[in-house]
Amino acid sequence: MRKLSHGPNPLAKDCPMSGYFIARNGKPTGPYLVSEIQHRIQSGDLAITDLCWKEGMTEWQPISAIQELGLALAEKAPPPIPTAPLSLPILQVQVPSVTAPMAAPILSRSPPDAVLTYVSIQRFVLLSVLSFGTYEAWWSYKNWQYLKKRDGLDISPFWRGWFMIFYIHKLLATIHDDKEANSVEQATFNASRLATTFIIIFIVVIGVSKIPGESLLPLLICGLIPTWAPIIPVQSYLNRVNQKRHPQIHPHKWSIGQVVCLLWGLLWWFIALVTVGNEVLA
């Protein structure tokens, strides 16, 4: 069974030893009595796949794997419905709504939020190329926005995204050390090396864009320089974390920001291609 982290239950180290502790966002909550856990599962606050631990257990395990909790949940299941009506109306069996099967509220829950950004590598590269790197700034902004909301940081995600080159080291290091993501899979990418590589490529792009002349050919060259390459290992790591943490969600929906970056980039690609084409034919 997968542990939340290496070593003997570090999440429960400072917790009082009574009841069951439930792992929520990489942190222990509780302790809860068996009846409290059963009530929270019925209300949809917990899922039977959530990890739990109590004194005497060697590792965190899903709620469904604990025999004591499994028996408590089974006792709350509704009685079987009669195959035919009983002779006396007053003795007819009705299943109360509060004792509906456990699976119903769990399956009806809205999909959980992804950890940081969750976008396929193909879409990431496509948007980066077509938007002349604008999407990378949007990617940085969305990660800082997530961290600010989750951790209560006193920062401006917009300006940290706009001036991405100055904050790329901090962002990649924060993602590398993120406890929520590392509770699912340990980060192995070299944050400092990737951030430095991004800055070098970004400086090359600036140099190409400063080539004198009225031609838009340098702009086309800038669009083809892979500033996105150093970010791929980071996004691949985040994708694996989200796939393991919530297999039921997928990065298939296009956000408004992605659509805006795509349209903005396509407009400039059209202008640059038409202009360079006219220069070649002239």
Image (tube, rainbow, N blue to C red):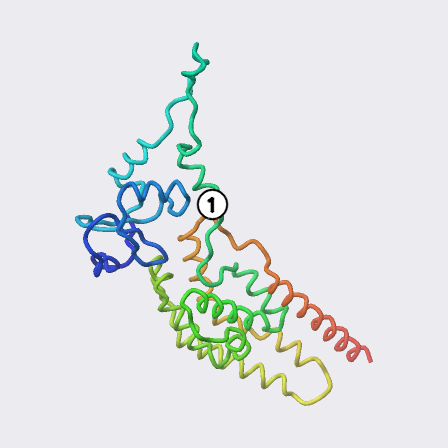
Image location (x, y in percent) of residue 79? 37, 24
* Number of marks drawn: 1
Say which of 211 and 263 sits in front.
263
At 55% across and 77% down in the image, what residue appears? 162
Q: Position of residue 46 (x, y in %)?
A: 37, 46
**184 shown above or below 218:** above
Q: Position of residue 234 (x, y in %)?
A: 44, 66
Position above or below: 32 against 90: below
Quadrant containing the C terminus is bottom right
Q: Nearer the viewer, residue 191 or 144?
A: 144
SS type, badge 1: loop
Residue 37: x and y, percent?
32, 44
Q: Nearer the viewer, residue 205 or 26?
A: 26
Residue with the most extreme front position: 90
In front of the other: 272 or 60: 60
Splitting the image into 4 quarters, where does residue 89 fall? top left
Residue at 70% of width from left, 71% of height from top?
A: 269
- Amino acid type of the residue that numbered disc 1 sits on in the rendered structure: Arg
Within the image, what quadrant is residue 206 found in?
Answer: bottom right
Picture residue at 49% right of the left edge, 80% below the top: 199
Q: Residues within 10 Å of mark 1 (few under 14, many from 20)?
A: few
Residue carrying label 1: 109
